[in-house]
Image: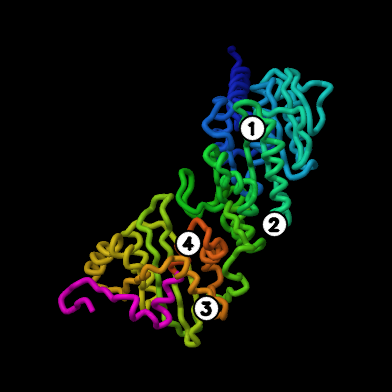
Amino acid sequence: MDDPQEEKLALILQRSREHLVDFMIAADPSFVPAWHLDMIADELEKLEREGDTKYKVLLVLCPPRHGKSTLCTVGFPAWFLGRNPTKEVITVSYSAELAQDFGAKTRTIAGDDVYKAIFNISLKEDEQGKAKWKTNKGGSYTSVGIGGSVTGRGANFLIFDDPIKNREEAESETYRQRVWDFFTSTAFTRLEPNGIVVVILTRWHVDDLAGRILANEQLKGRTKMIHFPSIATHDEEKRKTGEALWPERFSVAALNEIKNTIGPYDFDALYQGSPVLTENQELNPAWYRPISQEELEAKQTANFLTVDTAISKKSSADFTGFCDNGVDSENFWNFRAWRARLNPDELVETIFALHERRRYTTIGIEKTAYLDGLKPYLDAEQRKRGRYLPIVELKHNQTAKEVRIRGLIPRYASGSIRHVKGECSVLELEWAQFPNGLHDDVLDAAAYQLQIADGTHANTISIYRPKRAGFARR
Protein backbone atom coordinates (compact mmCIF):
# COMPACT_ATOMS: atom_id res chain seq x y z
CA MET A 1 0.00 0.00 0.00
CA ASP A 2 1.91 3.03 -1.32
CA ASP A 3 -0.76 5.72 -1.02
CA PRO A 4 -0.28 7.59 2.32
CA GLN A 5 -3.99 8.38 2.52
CA GLU A 6 -4.90 4.74 2.08
CA GLU A 7 -2.36 3.77 4.73
CA LYS A 8 -3.82 6.34 7.11
CA LEU A 9 -7.36 5.10 6.45
CA ALA A 10 -6.31 1.49 6.98
CA LEU A 11 -4.72 2.42 10.31
CA ILE A 12 -7.87 4.28 11.43
CA LEU A 13 -10.04 1.28 10.52
CA GLN A 14 -7.72 -1.11 12.34
CA ARG A 15 -7.57 0.99 15.50
CA SER A 16 -11.35 1.44 15.39
CA ARG A 17 -11.80 -2.33 15.29
CA GLU A 18 -9.43 -2.79 18.23
CA HIS A 19 -10.20 0.14 20.51
CA LEU A 20 -13.55 1.50 21.65
CA VAL A 21 -12.55 5.17 21.92
CA ASP A 22 -10.99 5.15 18.45
CA PHE A 23 -14.18 3.56 17.16
CA MET A 24 -16.28 6.30 18.79
CA ILE A 25 -14.14 9.04 17.26
CA ALA A 26 -14.52 7.47 13.81
CA ALA A 27 -18.22 6.56 14.08
CA ASP A 28 -19.69 9.51 15.99
CA PRO A 29 -18.56 13.03 14.99
CA SER A 30 -20.08 14.47 18.18
CA PHE A 31 -18.06 12.25 20.50
CA VAL A 32 -15.53 14.12 22.67
CA PRO A 33 -12.81 11.94 24.26
CA ALA A 34 -11.64 12.43 27.84
CA TRP A 35 -9.31 10.57 30.21
CA HIS A 36 -12.09 9.16 32.37
CA LEU A 37 -13.82 7.79 29.26
CA ASP A 38 -10.52 6.18 28.24
CA MET A 39 -10.42 4.37 31.58
CA ILE A 40 -13.99 3.13 31.26
CA ALA A 41 -13.31 2.02 27.69
CA ASP A 42 -10.21 0.10 28.79
CA GLU A 43 -12.32 -1.88 31.25
CA LEU A 44 -15.03 -2.62 28.69
CA GLU A 45 -12.38 -3.79 26.21
CA LYS A 46 -10.96 -6.19 28.82
CA LEU A 47 -14.41 -7.64 29.39
CA GLU A 48 -15.01 -8.09 25.67
CA ARG A 49 -11.67 -9.81 25.12
CA GLU A 50 -11.34 -11.94 28.23
CA GLY A 51 -14.82 -13.45 28.30
CA ASP A 52 -14.84 -15.42 31.54
CA THR A 53 -13.82 -12.88 34.19
CA LYS A 54 -13.38 -12.84 37.93
CA TYR A 55 -16.39 -10.58 38.32
CA LYS A 56 -19.92 -10.52 36.99
CA VAL A 57 -20.90 -6.85 37.36
CA LEU A 58 -19.09 -3.72 36.26
CA LEU A 59 -20.48 -0.73 38.15
CA VAL A 60 -19.73 2.68 36.62
CA LEU A 61 -20.60 5.69 38.79
CA CYS A 62 -20.25 8.95 36.89
CA PRO A 63 -21.88 12.42 37.09
CA PRO A 64 -24.58 13.58 34.67
CA ARG A 65 -23.50 14.84 31.23
CA HIS A 66 -20.00 13.40 31.49
CA GLY A 67 -20.23 11.05 28.48
CA LYS A 68 -20.93 7.77 30.25
CA SER A 69 -24.11 6.90 28.31
CA THR A 70 -22.70 7.88 24.93
CA LEU A 71 -19.71 5.61 25.47
CA CYS A 72 -21.23 2.68 27.37
CA THR A 73 -24.85 2.48 26.25
CA VAL A 74 -24.73 3.88 22.71
CA GLY A 75 -21.22 3.18 21.42
CA PHE A 76 -20.12 0.02 23.21
CA PRO A 77 -23.00 -2.22 21.99
CA ALA A 78 -22.26 -1.23 18.38
CA TRP A 79 -18.51 -1.86 18.81
CA PHE A 80 -19.12 -5.15 20.62
CA LEU A 81 -21.51 -6.46 17.96
CA GLY A 82 -19.11 -5.35 15.24
CA ARG A 83 -16.43 -7.54 16.80
CA ASN A 84 -18.91 -10.28 17.79
CA PRO A 85 -21.65 -10.18 15.14
CA THR A 86 -23.36 -13.39 16.33
CA LYS A 87 -23.71 -12.35 19.98
CA GLU A 88 -26.42 -10.45 21.84
CA VAL A 89 -26.79 -7.23 23.84
CA ILE A 90 -29.67 -6.02 25.99
CA THR A 91 -29.86 -2.47 27.35
CA VAL A 92 -32.26 -1.32 30.07
CA SER A 93 -33.26 2.20 31.13
CA TYR A 94 -35.91 3.72 33.39
CA SER A 95 -38.42 4.08 30.53
CA ALA A 96 -39.16 2.46 27.20
CA GLU A 97 -38.90 5.88 25.54
CA LEU A 98 -35.33 6.43 26.77
CA ALA A 99 -34.44 2.84 25.92
CA GLN A 100 -35.69 3.35 22.35
CA ASP A 101 -33.70 6.57 22.12
CA PHE A 102 -30.53 4.71 23.07
CA GLY A 103 -31.41 1.93 20.64
CA ALA A 104 -32.02 4.34 17.77
CA LYS A 105 -28.64 6.03 18.32
CA THR A 106 -26.82 2.71 18.40
CA ARG A 107 -28.69 1.55 15.29
CA THR A 108 -27.71 4.76 13.48
CA ILE A 109 -24.04 4.05 14.18
CA ALA A 110 -24.36 0.38 13.17
CA GLY A 111 -26.20 1.27 9.98
CA ASP A 112 -23.67 3.82 8.77
CA ASP A 113 -21.18 3.24 5.95
CA VAL A 114 -18.30 3.96 8.34
CA TYR A 115 -19.42 1.05 10.51
CA LYS A 116 -19.60 -1.24 7.49
CA ALA A 117 -16.08 -0.21 6.49
CA ILE A 118 -14.71 -0.91 9.95
CA PHE A 119 -16.35 -4.29 10.56
CA ASN A 120 -17.62 -5.45 7.18
CA ILE A 121 -21.07 -6.25 8.57
CA SER A 122 -24.47 -4.56 8.29
CA LEU A 123 -27.93 -4.63 9.81
CA LYS A 124 -30.37 -7.34 8.83
CA GLU A 125 -32.73 -5.66 6.39
CA ASP A 126 -36.03 -6.90 7.80
CA GLU A 127 -35.18 -6.28 11.49
CA GLN A 128 -34.12 -2.68 12.06
CA GLY A 129 -36.51 -1.32 14.71
CA LYS A 130 -35.41 1.31 17.20
CA ALA A 131 -35.60 -1.04 20.17
CA LYS A 132 -34.84 -4.35 18.45
CA TRP A 133 -32.56 -5.07 15.52
CA LYS A 134 -30.16 -7.71 14.29
CA THR A 135 -26.89 -7.88 12.41
CA ASN A 136 -26.70 -9.75 9.12
CA LYS A 137 -24.66 -12.38 10.99
CA GLY A 138 -27.39 -13.22 13.53
CA GLY A 139 -26.37 -11.02 16.47
CA SER A 140 -29.08 -9.00 18.19
CA TYR A 141 -29.66 -5.76 20.07
CA THR A 142 -32.64 -5.20 22.38
CA SER A 143 -33.49 -2.14 24.47
CA VAL A 144 -36.30 -2.05 27.04
CA GLY A 145 -37.53 0.05 29.93
CA ILE A 146 -37.81 -1.27 33.48
CA GLY A 147 -40.51 -3.93 33.39
CA GLY A 148 -40.24 -4.43 29.63
CA SER A 149 -40.24 -7.84 27.98
CA VAL A 150 -36.97 -9.58 27.13
CA THR A 151 -38.55 -12.98 26.53
CA GLY A 152 -36.67 -14.98 23.93
CA ARG A 153 -33.62 -12.70 24.07
CA GLY A 154 -30.25 -13.55 25.54
CA ALA A 155 -27.40 -11.26 26.56
CA ASN A 156 -23.66 -11.58 26.44
CA PHE A 157 -23.74 -8.04 27.78
CA LEU A 158 -26.63 -6.71 29.84
CA ILE A 159 -26.37 -2.93 30.24
CA PHE A 160 -28.41 -0.98 32.79
CA ASP A 161 -28.25 2.80 32.26
CA ASP A 162 -29.87 5.12 34.83
CA PRO A 163 -32.72 2.84 35.98
CA ILE A 164 -34.03 5.63 38.26
CA LYS A 165 -35.40 8.78 36.64
CA ASN A 166 -35.64 11.31 39.46
CA ARG A 167 -35.79 11.97 43.20
CA GLU A 168 -39.44 10.95 43.42
CA GLU A 169 -38.70 7.47 42.07
CA ALA A 170 -35.55 7.21 44.20
CA GLU A 171 -37.47 7.96 47.40
CA SER A 172 -40.11 5.32 46.57
CA GLU A 173 -39.24 2.02 48.21
CA THR A 174 -41.83 0.38 45.95
CA TYR A 175 -40.07 1.62 42.81
CA ARG A 176 -36.61 0.69 44.11
CA GLN A 177 -37.90 -2.81 44.76
CA ARG A 178 -39.40 -2.93 41.27
CA VAL A 179 -35.99 -2.10 39.76
CA TRP A 180 -34.29 -4.74 41.88
CA ASP A 181 -36.89 -7.39 41.05
CA PHE A 182 -36.50 -6.68 37.33
CA PHE A 183 -32.71 -6.81 37.65
CA THR A 184 -32.63 -10.14 39.50
CA SER A 185 -35.69 -12.02 38.27
CA THR A 186 -35.98 -10.88 34.66
CA ALA A 187 -32.89 -9.29 33.19
CA PHE A 188 -30.21 -11.23 35.06
CA THR A 189 -31.74 -14.52 33.97
CA ARG A 190 -31.16 -13.59 30.31
CA LEU A 191 -27.38 -13.68 30.67
CA GLU A 192 -25.49 -16.16 28.54
CA PRO A 193 -22.71 -18.23 30.15
CA ASN A 194 -19.87 -15.82 31.06
CA GLY A 195 -22.20 -12.92 30.35
CA ILE A 196 -21.47 -9.58 32.02
CA VAL A 197 -23.73 -6.94 33.57
CA VAL A 198 -22.70 -3.30 33.17
CA VAL A 199 -24.53 -0.82 35.40
CA ILE A 200 -24.02 2.86 34.55
CA LEU A 201 -25.70 5.41 36.75
CA THR A 202 -25.74 8.58 38.75
CA ARG A 203 -26.73 7.85 42.31
CA TRP A 204 -29.90 9.11 43.93
CA HIS A 205 -30.22 6.95 47.01
CA VAL A 206 -28.17 4.61 49.19
CA ASP A 207 -30.71 1.86 48.42
CA ASP A 208 -30.62 2.32 44.63
CA LEU A 209 -29.55 -0.45 42.25
CA ALA A 210 -25.86 0.19 42.91
CA GLY A 211 -26.44 0.15 46.65
CA ARG A 212 -28.32 -3.15 46.49
CA ILE A 213 -25.66 -4.76 44.31
CA LEU A 214 -22.91 -3.71 46.72
CA ALA A 215 -24.95 -5.00 49.68
CA ASN A 216 -25.85 -8.34 48.06
CA GLU A 217 -23.83 -11.25 49.47
CA GLN A 218 -23.77 -13.08 46.12
CA LEU A 219 -22.83 -10.09 43.97
CA LYS A 220 -20.65 -7.73 46.01
CA GLY A 221 -17.62 -10.02 45.78
CA ARG A 222 -18.09 -10.29 42.01
CA THR A 223 -18.58 -6.58 41.35
CA LYS A 224 -15.95 -4.12 40.17
CA MET A 225 -16.71 -0.44 40.69
CA ILE A 226 -15.35 2.51 38.72
CA HIS A 227 -16.25 5.72 40.56
CA PHE A 228 -15.62 9.21 39.21
CA PRO A 229 -16.86 12.03 41.49
CA SER A 230 -17.21 15.31 39.63
CA ILE A 231 -14.75 16.94 42.06
CA ALA A 232 -11.93 14.74 43.33
CA THR A 233 -12.15 13.97 47.06
CA HIS A 234 -8.54 12.73 47.19
CA ASP A 235 -5.51 12.57 44.95
CA GLU A 236 -6.06 10.19 42.03
CA GLU A 237 -3.91 8.85 39.23
CA LYS A 238 -5.04 11.57 36.84
CA ARG A 239 -6.01 14.49 39.08
CA LYS A 240 -5.52 16.08 42.48
CA THR A 241 -7.94 16.66 45.34
CA GLY A 242 -10.43 19.39 44.46
CA GLU A 243 -9.98 19.15 40.69
CA ALA A 244 -12.89 18.69 38.29
CA LEU A 245 -13.39 15.44 36.40
CA TRP A 246 -13.87 17.08 33.01
CA PRO A 247 -12.83 20.74 33.43
CA GLU A 248 -13.18 21.48 29.71
CA ARG A 249 -16.92 20.89 30.07
CA PHE A 250 -17.59 21.42 33.77
CA SER A 251 -15.13 23.57 35.70
CA VAL A 252 -15.02 23.57 39.51
CA ALA A 253 -16.75 26.97 39.42
CA ALA A 254 -19.51 25.57 37.19
CA LEU A 255 -19.92 22.53 39.44
CA ASN A 256 -20.15 24.72 42.54
CA GLU A 257 -22.83 26.77 40.79
CA ILE A 258 -24.75 23.54 40.16
CA LYS A 259 -24.30 22.61 43.82
CA ASN A 260 -25.67 25.97 44.97
CA THR A 261 -28.65 25.52 42.64
CA ILE A 262 -29.69 21.93 43.40
CA GLY A 263 -28.47 21.80 47.02
CA PRO A 264 -25.69 19.78 48.71
CA TYR A 265 -27.63 16.54 49.11
CA ASP A 266 -28.62 16.11 45.47
CA PHE A 267 -25.19 17.33 44.37
CA ASP A 268 -23.33 14.84 46.56
CA ALA A 269 -25.59 12.04 45.34
CA LEU A 270 -25.67 12.84 41.62
CA TYR A 271 -22.31 14.48 41.07
CA GLN A 272 -20.17 12.91 43.79
CA GLY A 273 -21.74 9.45 43.93
CA SER A 274 -22.37 9.82 47.66
CA PRO A 275 -26.12 9.56 48.33
CA VAL A 276 -27.71 10.32 51.67
CA LEU A 277 -30.52 8.41 53.38
CA THR A 278 -32.37 11.61 54.23
CA GLU A 279 -35.29 9.97 56.02
CA ASN A 280 -32.92 8.52 58.64
CA GLN A 281 -30.98 11.70 59.44
CA GLU A 282 -30.48 12.17 63.16
CA LEU A 283 -29.89 15.91 62.82
CA ASN A 284 -32.66 18.00 61.28
CA PRO A 285 -31.11 20.21 58.55
CA ALA A 286 -33.59 22.92 59.59
CA TRP A 287 -31.54 23.29 62.79
CA TYR A 288 -28.57 24.70 60.87
CA ARG A 289 -28.24 28.43 61.48
CA PRO A 290 -26.21 30.10 58.71
CA ILE A 291 -24.03 33.13 59.35
CA SER A 292 -22.03 35.04 56.78
CA GLN A 293 -18.31 35.61 57.03
CA GLU A 294 -18.95 39.36 57.23
CA GLU A 295 -21.43 38.99 60.10
CA LEU A 296 -19.01 36.85 62.07
CA GLU A 297 -16.08 39.18 61.54
CA ALA A 298 -18.12 41.99 63.10
CA LYS A 299 -18.36 40.03 66.35
CA GLN A 300 -15.85 39.61 69.16
CA THR A 301 -15.14 35.89 69.49
CA ALA A 302 -12.99 33.52 71.50
CA ASN A 303 -11.67 30.97 69.05
CA PHE A 304 -11.22 27.24 69.63
CA LEU A 305 -9.78 24.61 67.28
CA THR A 306 -10.35 20.87 67.60
CA VAL A 307 -8.49 18.32 65.46
CA ASP A 308 -9.35 14.67 64.85
CA THR A 309 -6.07 13.39 63.45
CA ALA A 310 -5.30 10.73 60.83
CA ILE A 311 -1.57 10.82 60.18
CA SER A 312 -1.43 9.49 56.63
CA LYS A 313 -1.77 10.67 53.03
CA LYS A 314 -2.89 7.29 51.66
CA SER A 315 -6.12 7.54 49.70
CA SER A 316 -7.58 4.74 51.82
CA ALA A 317 -6.80 6.49 55.11
CA ASP A 318 -9.24 8.56 57.15
CA PHE A 319 -9.12 12.31 56.85
CA THR A 320 -7.88 14.67 59.52
CA GLY A 321 -10.95 16.61 60.62
CA PHE A 322 -10.86 20.25 61.74
CA CYS A 323 -13.48 22.32 63.55
CA ASP A 324 -12.85 26.03 64.10
CA ASN A 325 -15.35 27.48 66.57
CA GLY A 326 -15.73 31.21 67.17
CA VAL A 327 -17.71 31.61 70.42
CA ASP A 328 -19.33 35.05 70.56
CA SER A 329 -20.49 37.15 73.52
CA GLU A 330 -23.96 35.57 73.42
CA ASN A 331 -22.41 32.07 73.58
CA PHE A 332 -23.37 31.18 70.02
CA TRP A 333 -20.94 28.70 68.46
CA ASN A 334 -19.92 29.62 64.93
CA PHE A 335 -18.42 26.65 63.07
CA ARG A 336 -16.03 26.39 60.19
CA ALA A 337 -15.25 22.73 59.54
CA TRP A 338 -13.25 20.84 56.93
CA ARG A 339 -11.02 17.82 56.39
CA ALA A 340 -7.78 16.94 54.61
CA ARG A 341 -5.31 14.10 54.19
CA LEU A 342 -2.03 15.34 55.67
CA ASN A 343 1.25 13.86 56.80
CA PRO A 344 2.57 14.94 60.24
CA ASP A 345 4.76 17.77 58.94
CA GLU A 346 1.89 19.19 56.86
CA LEU A 347 -0.50 18.95 59.80
CA VAL A 348 1.89 20.77 62.11
CA GLU A 349 2.39 23.51 59.52
CA THR A 350 -1.38 23.79 59.10
CA ILE A 351 -1.96 24.17 62.86
CA PHE A 352 0.70 26.88 63.14
CA ALA A 353 -0.74 28.76 60.16
CA LEU A 354 -4.28 28.58 61.54
CA HIS A 355 -3.18 29.80 64.96
CA GLU A 356 -1.26 32.68 63.41
CA ARG A 357 -4.47 33.82 61.74
CA ARG A 358 -7.05 32.95 64.40
CA ARG A 359 -5.17 33.20 67.74
CA TYR A 360 -6.93 30.29 69.38
CA THR A 361 -7.71 30.26 73.08
CA THR A 362 -7.34 26.49 72.98
CA ILE A 363 -6.30 23.90 70.38
CA GLY A 364 -7.64 20.45 71.28
CA ILE A 365 -6.25 17.19 69.91
CA GLU A 366 -7.40 13.70 70.86
CA LYS A 367 -4.87 12.30 73.32
CA THR A 368 -4.30 8.87 71.78
CA ALA A 369 -3.79 10.11 68.25
CA TYR A 370 -1.77 13.07 69.50
CA LEU A 371 0.65 11.00 71.56
CA ASP A 372 1.00 8.21 69.02
CA GLY A 373 1.45 10.26 65.88
CA LEU A 374 1.68 14.00 66.07
CA LYS A 375 3.40 14.93 69.34
CA PRO A 376 7.07 14.39 68.32
CA TYR A 377 6.65 16.53 65.20
CA LEU A 378 4.78 19.27 67.06
CA ASP A 379 7.25 19.33 69.95
CA ALA A 380 10.20 19.71 67.61
CA GLU A 381 8.54 22.48 65.61
CA GLN A 382 7.54 24.45 68.71
CA ARG A 383 11.11 24.36 70.01
CA LYS A 384 12.46 25.28 66.58
CA ARG A 385 10.16 28.29 66.26
CA GLY A 386 10.29 29.27 69.93
CA ARG A 387 6.51 29.54 69.84
CA TYR A 388 4.31 27.37 72.02
CA LEU A 389 0.73 26.68 71.07
CA PRO A 390 -2.20 26.47 73.53
CA ILE A 391 -2.62 22.72 72.98
CA VAL A 392 -4.69 20.46 75.20
CA GLU A 393 -4.93 16.69 74.96
CA LEU A 394 -8.56 15.63 74.72
CA LYS A 395 -9.70 12.43 76.40
CA HIS A 396 -12.71 10.46 75.23
CA ASN A 397 -12.86 8.47 78.51
CA GLN A 398 -13.98 5.34 76.64
CA THR A 399 -17.10 7.09 75.41
CA ALA A 400 -18.18 5.76 72.01
CA LYS A 401 -17.66 8.18 69.13
CA GLU A 402 -21.35 8.10 68.17
CA VAL A 403 -22.32 9.12 71.73
CA ARG A 404 -19.83 12.00 71.70
CA ILE A 405 -21.17 13.22 68.36
CA ARG A 406 -24.79 13.01 69.48
CA GLY A 407 -23.83 15.34 72.33
CA LEU A 408 -23.97 18.17 69.79
CA ILE A 409 -27.63 17.59 68.94
CA PRO A 410 -29.13 19.53 71.89
CA ARG A 411 -27.06 22.58 70.95
CA TYR A 412 -28.18 22.33 67.33
CA ALA A 413 -31.81 21.86 68.36
CA SER A 414 -31.68 24.99 70.53
CA GLY A 415 -30.26 27.04 67.66
CA SER A 416 -26.97 27.66 69.48
CA ILE A 417 -24.70 26.48 66.64
CA ARG A 418 -24.24 28.46 63.45
CA HIS A 419 -22.50 27.36 60.25
CA VAL A 420 -20.38 29.93 58.47
CA LYS A 421 -21.73 30.03 54.93
CA GLY A 422 -19.69 27.98 52.49
CA GLU A 423 -17.40 26.63 55.24
CA CYS A 424 -19.33 23.60 56.55
CA SER A 425 -20.37 21.54 53.52
CA VAL A 426 -18.39 18.46 54.60
CA LEU A 427 -19.74 18.72 58.16
CA GLU A 428 -23.30 18.88 56.82
CA LEU A 429 -22.69 15.89 54.56
CA GLU A 430 -21.28 13.81 57.44
CA TRP A 431 -24.28 14.76 59.57
CA ALA A 432 -26.62 13.66 56.78
CA GLN A 433 -24.89 10.27 56.59
CA PHE A 434 -24.41 9.77 60.34
CA PRO A 435 -24.08 7.17 61.83
CA ASN A 436 -23.69 5.06 58.67
CA GLY A 437 -21.38 7.29 56.65
CA LEU A 438 -17.98 6.24 55.39
CA HIS A 439 -16.32 9.21 57.13
CA ASP A 440 -17.08 11.06 60.37
CA ASP A 441 -13.76 12.82 60.96
CA VAL A 442 -15.19 16.35 60.84
CA LEU A 443 -18.12 15.36 63.04
CA ASP A 444 -15.72 13.94 65.61
CA ALA A 445 -13.65 17.12 65.56
CA ALA A 446 -16.83 19.17 66.07
CA ALA A 447 -17.94 16.96 68.96
CA TYR A 448 -14.68 17.64 70.79
CA GLN A 449 -15.72 21.30 70.98
CA LEU A 450 -17.99 20.17 73.82
CA GLN A 451 -14.85 19.58 75.90
CA ILE A 452 -13.04 22.86 75.29
CA ALA A 453 -15.55 25.53 74.30
CA ASP A 454 -18.24 25.27 76.98
CA GLY A 455 -16.08 25.41 80.11
CA THR A 456 -16.56 21.75 81.04
CA HIS A 457 -13.09 20.56 80.14
CA ALA A 458 -11.35 20.72 83.51
CA ASN A 459 -11.68 17.00 84.13
CA THR A 460 -11.36 15.78 80.55
CA ILE A 461 -8.17 17.42 79.29
CA SER A 462 -4.60 17.99 80.33
CA ILE A 463 -2.52 20.91 79.16
CA TYR A 464 0.85 20.09 77.63
CA ARG A 465 3.90 22.07 76.65
CA PRO A 466 7.25 20.57 75.67
CA LYS A 467 9.87 21.02 78.35
CA ARG A 468 12.17 24.00 78.08
CA ALA A 469 14.01 26.26 80.49
CA GLY A 470 11.58 28.04 82.78
CA PHE A 471 8.52 26.26 81.28
CA ALA A 472 7.27 23.01 82.73
CA ARG A 473 4.31 20.71 82.47
CA ARG A 474 1.32 21.88 84.46
Q: Would you name the residue on which mark 2 appears?
A: 171
Coordinates of residue 437 in the picture (x, y in percent): 52, 58
Label 1 sits on a secondary structure element that is helix
**Which tag, 4 or 3, sits closer to the chain's start?**
3
Is residue 40 positioned above or below 469 on the image? above
Is residue 186 positioned above or below 193 on the image? below
Q: Residue at x 60, y 27 (%)?
A: 194
**Which tag, 2 or 3, sits closer to the chain's start?**
2
Q: Residue at x 35, y 67 (%)?
A: 366
**Which tag, 2 or 1, sits closer to the chain's start?**
1
Q: In which quadrant will I find the N terminus?
A: top right
Query: Residue 347: which quarter of the image?
Result: bottom left
Q: Distance between the Cα atoms at labels 4 and 3?
A: 19 Å
Crowding around mark 2 (Cα neighbors within 10 Å: few <14, some 14 to 19, many 20+) is some
**Which tag, 1 or 4, sits closer to the chain's start?**
1
**Which tag, 1 or 3, sits closer to the chain's start?**
1
Coordinates of residue 460 in the picture (x, y in percent): 34, 76
Q: Would you name the residue on which mark 1 appears?
A: 25
Is residue 130 positioned above or below 146 on the image? above
Q: Which residues are magenta?
A: 446-474
The amino acid sitting under disc 2 is Glu
Q: Is residue 472 located in the magenta-colored stretch of the structure?
A: yes
Q: Which mark is residue 411?
A: 3
Q: Distance between the Cα atoms at labels 4 and 2?
A: 24 Å
Coordinates of residue 7 in the picture (x, y in percent): 59, 18
The answer to whether residue 26 is seen in the rendering is no
Label 3 sits on a secondary structure element that is helix
Q: Residue at x 82, y 24 (%)?
A: 127
Number of numbered callouts drawn: 4
